[in-house]
Image (cartoon, rainbow, N blue to C red):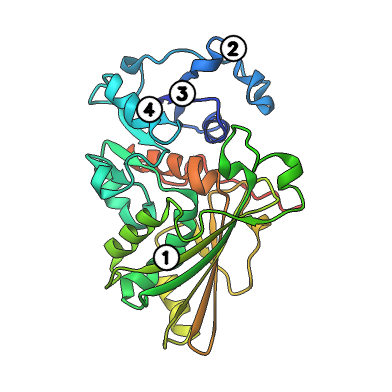
Amino acid sequence: MIRVGIAGAAGYTAGELIRILVNHPAVELRYLQSESHREEPIGRVHRDLLYSKQVFTDLDFDDIDVLFLCMGHGVSARFLSENKIPSSVRVIDLSNDFRLRASAGNFVYGLPELNKDKIMECQRVANPGCFATAIELALLPFAKSGLLTDRITAFGITGATGAGQRPTEETHYSNRAQNLSVYKVFTHQHLGEIRETLQEAGAKTELDIAFVPVRGCHTRGIMVNVVFQSKATLEELTTLYKTYYEQHPFVLMSDEPVSLKQVVNTNYCFIHPDKEGDNVLVTSMIDNLIKGASGQAVQNMNLMFGLDEMTGLRLKANYF
């Protein structure tokens, strides 16, 4: 059994991580750490886990095989600098502290559809961001084939859980419900990792990505529409997708338009390409808390420990 500890176990991503791992056949949840909820039952915070007997406790690094960091951006790096983690303990960080090359150190960027072999051999993984995951999976086959133009437009809508658990004016119900609003236009923090990832995959140039993120009025799920130009036919583009993702079970290409309800509560990314003239549209759908965070973290754990990457992640969408 893989002995698991979670630091920062009271937030949204940690809650999803616990829900997945309690049913994982190869995992034993040992320690769920939260500074603000120490010794409280986890069901008091994660209300759908009332059946669990576990409480929030301090971590014992000598009694775990893998440590998940579900902490705020900037907190993970400080946590690792302040705590001596045994070299035998694998670390999976869900913040953005180690995603970029300049700050990665010995962390591998944890996008299995690009770095599967590296993840299987490494000790530390930087889990990708949610918007980054959706956009990267939409464009990886084209980057590898050298078909990406240097000008890309991306329009993405995310659910309220993407902003985290801490209440803000933007996440307040009276603001979010029946409303849409843009934020961090052209400057979103995931752009750096998207550019680096697509270049690593084979993009020929420094990509100019005009990204417009939108706050949606739903709780979870990301829809991204990516537009670029190509002379390739739709059939050629479709073949590129099917060939690239043939060995990657969580990315599925659909011949029909896709919707959020197909992927929410799953670790899947559903993709639909379309083309009119030279304009290519790729629609990419993920659950921001699962494939965009905790599910992908478990997928990475499975690879690190030599398991089938789908173990514990055969989740059905809440379609109705």
Q: Is residue 317 above or below residue 107?
A: below
- Residue 119 in picture, x, y percent from top left: 30, 45
Q: Which mark is residue 40?
A: 2
* 3D distance between C-alphas at marks 1 and 3: 32 Å
Compared across the picture, whether 288 is left or right of 311 comes to right
The amino acid pointed to by label 3 is Glu
Q: Residue type at mark 4?
A: Leu
Q: Which residue is mark 1?
A: 246
Task: Indicate which label's residue lies in the foreground, 4 or 3.
Answer: 4
Q: Earlier in the sequence, mark 1 or mark 3?
A: 3
The earlier-in-sequence mark between 2 and 1 is 2
Position in image of residue 64 (x %, y %): 36, 21
**Furthest-top residue in this view:** 39
Residue under the image location 65 percent in, 50 percent down: 317
Q: Residue 67 bears which disc, if any? A: 4
Name the element at disc 3: strand
